[in-house]
Image (spheres, rainbow, N blue to C red):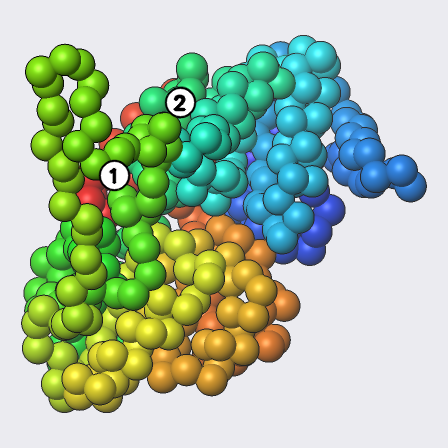
Amino acid sequence: MNAARSGYRVFSANSTAACTELAKTITERLGVELGKSAVYQETNGETRVEIKESVRGHDIFIIQTIPRDVNTAVMELLIMAYALKTSCARNIIGVIPYFPYSKQSKMRKRGSIVCKLLASMLAKAGLTHIITMDLHQKEIQGFFSFPVDNLRASPFLLQYIQEEIPDYRNAVIVAKSPDAAKRAQSYAERLRLGLAVIHGEAQCTEQDMDDGRHSPPTVKNATVHSGLELPLMMAKEKPPITVVGDVGGRIAIIVDDIIDDVESFVAAAEILKERGAYKIFVMATHGILSADAPRLIEESAVDEVVVTNTVPHEVQKLQCPKIKTVDISLILSEAIRRIHNGESMAYLFRNITVDD
């Protein structure tokens, strides 16, 4: 395809090797050249973006992966979108496989819903559409004033299980907490496997965190109005850790959307090992793997961690050979092609439910 006649361009929003590599893979699949631009940090730390070709009247797709320096990546995306907007691009579509700040999508104490703020900033900068993958909370789509295509990585991870785990028929899909049970159930039903759920983990889940609505703190037997007393809520108490389901003599496959702080995954692996699982895999879409995650995985009972290339993690792979990568550039390329040609996106969601 001739890029000059195609009516669209694909740009990489940062100069990191991982983002450039993903952008080049996508453009090779599409048969176009990567757009010419320069994205760099000045000596004072400010981000500068220069578009080095005409984009007037074109659909522009910005590939932006999120490295460890999240805030710099966000600024690169905002500045590039604004530069393209002022250069008279027709549509500006952000291809953001892992959407940053997606964990901050609920009110916590006296904090803020940062994900909503970022959605507003992207719209103000000039983005008209977003392609992302496996949002941490699907309700995040409602934060945007423009279309959001939330693609799924589950077909690629399911294919990996079927092709790379020889005895996967002897496996059981595991949810490391009740919150992840729906996703695990979806995987189990597609693979025709059993399901297990770990219940009673020591750490607090998102639902247990104080959302700040009891301010000032409730006082026992406090009277709100003359003659009116509210019933007291019983404090939550974590039950002992149990595994609901049989994992003895089986391969345990833990599934989730994000693997960042790995302590909960390591603890789950230890429990599954104690219950008789002889091999343990962790499957997740976004492998952020912060801090000491590679070392903890290497020293744990986890045999393999499988993530997609939505987030750069080459450094972590060098530190931990257990980390494997699944390429999802194919579905991103097809999404770009269909959006530019005005074709239906339904094909990319065939047989996919809300729980995937």
Q: Please give left or right for residue 326 compared with residue 321 in the image.
A: left
Q: What residue is shown with label 1? A: 349
| Secondary element type, mark 2 | helix
The percent position of residue 275, horizontal first and vertical second, equals 17, 84
Q: Please give left or right for residue 251 compared with residue 342 in the image.
A: left
Q: Residue at x 89, y 38 (%)?
A: 44
Q: What residue is shown with label 2? A: 143
Residue 306 visible in image: yes
| Secondary element type, mark 1 | helix
Disc 1 marks a residue whose amino acid type is Phe
- Give the quarter of the image for residue 332: top left
For the image, the number of numbered tags is: 2
Residue in the foreground of this view, choosing between 3 and 97 = 97
Quadrant in which the N terminus is drawn: top right
| Classed neighbour count for the residue bearing mark 2: other residues with Cα under 10 Å, few (<14), some (14–19), many (≥20) | some
Disc 2 marks a residue whose amino acid type is Phe
- Give the quarter of the image for residue 42: top right
Q: Residue at x 77, y 38 (%)?
A: 39
The percent position of residue 210, horizontal first and vertical second, equals 34, 40
The percent position of residue 128, horizontal first and vertical second, equals 50, 18
Q: Residue at x 58, y 15 (%)?
A: 124
Q: Residue at x 10, y 58 (%)?
A: 189
- Give the quarter of the image for residue 195: bottom left
Residue in the foreground of this view, choosing between 320 and 1 = 320
